[in-house]
Structures are given as structure tokens and as C-alpha cells.
């Protein structure tokens, strides 16, 4: 997410980036970039906390993954709704996979919350 935010700052959101079309109607590209960077930074902090705070860390990690799943699923759905006849790009399948990976991360974070050993 940090990478997408930095990409939006470096090269403002192009008109053909359909995953953000609906979102750009409501907020500016600068807000989207700041949001992605903030969420990404919070998730990095949650990963660090996950290793140091055994009781709170997994909950922070699972909350970050839930937010990530929500963001990726909305981008996936945006591509499906905005241009259902033009699904030849890799955007929709990639966001679909990101969503599932985030859901798996939620499960893993909560499943490992009682384990104190390293490894997985």
C-alpha cells in the first residue's frame, strides 16, 4: 500500500486506472495517496508490534489485514462494476488474490495469538 501511495504521488492517478475511478469522484488523488501511505505505515507498525507485544500484536495485525482486505476487495469490485466488459487486464484478478491473502492473514494472526514460539 505504501508503494501505491508513493506511485500516486510520483505520477498522479492516470485516467485509465479504473480501480480508483469511483473513489476519485469522492476524494482527491492526494487524499488517496496519503490514505494508502498511512494504512501501509500502520500495518508495518502492527507487524513490528506483532513480534514484540504478544497480546496486542496479533489483534493489530488482524485489524490491519481486515482493512487491507476491505481496500483490495473494493478495488476489485470497482474494476468489475466500472468495466465488466473489459476484464482483460490483470488488475481484477490481482486485487482478488490480494483480498484472499489478507483474509488468510487475519486467520493466521488470530490462530497464532496464543503461541509464544517463533516459526509458523
Image (cartoon, rainbow, N blue to C red):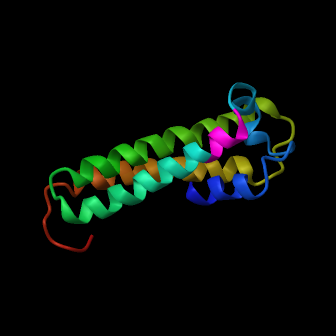
Compared across the picture, whether 44 is left or right of 72 comes to left
Give the quadrant of the C terminus.
bottom left
Q: Position of residue 94 (x, y in %)?
A: 65, 54
Q: Is residue 66 above or below residue 53?
A: above
Q: Magenta stretch: dominant SS?
A: helix
Which residue is nearer to you in this view: 26 or 18? 26
Q: Residue at x 20, y 74 (%)?
A: 118
Pick the front one: 12 or 93: 12
Q: The magenta stretch spans which residues? A: 28-33
The quadrant in which the N terminus is found is: bottom right
* Residue 75 pos. (x, y %): 65, 40
Which residue is at 40% across, 47% downward? 64
Splitting the image into 4 quarters, where does residue 31 fall? top right
Residue 24 falls in image quadrant = top right
Farthest residue, direction bottom: 119
The residue positioned 33% from the left and 47% from the top of the image is 62
Foreground pick, 87 / 65: 65
Amino acid at each position: 500500500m505504501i508503494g501505491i501511495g508513493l506511485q500516486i504521488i510520483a505520477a498522479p492517478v492516470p485516467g485509465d486506472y479504473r480501480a480508483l475511478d469511483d473513489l476519485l469522484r469522492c476524494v482527491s488523488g492526494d487524499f488517496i495517496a496519503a490514505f494508502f501511505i498511512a494504512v501501509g505505515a500502520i500495518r508495518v507498525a502492527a507487524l513490528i508490534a506483532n513480534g514484540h507485544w504478544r497480546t496486542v500484536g496479533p489483534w493489530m495485525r488482524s485489524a490491519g489485514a481486515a482493512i487491507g482486505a476491505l481496500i483490495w476487495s473494493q478495488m476489485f469490485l470497482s474494476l468489475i462494476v466500472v468495466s465488466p466488459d473489459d476484464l482483460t487486464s490483470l488488475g481484477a484478478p490481482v486485487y482478488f488474490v490480494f483480498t484472499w491473502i489478507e483474509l488468510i492473514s487475519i486467520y493466521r494472526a488470530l490462530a497464532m495469538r496464543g503461541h509464544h514460539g517463533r516459526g509458523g
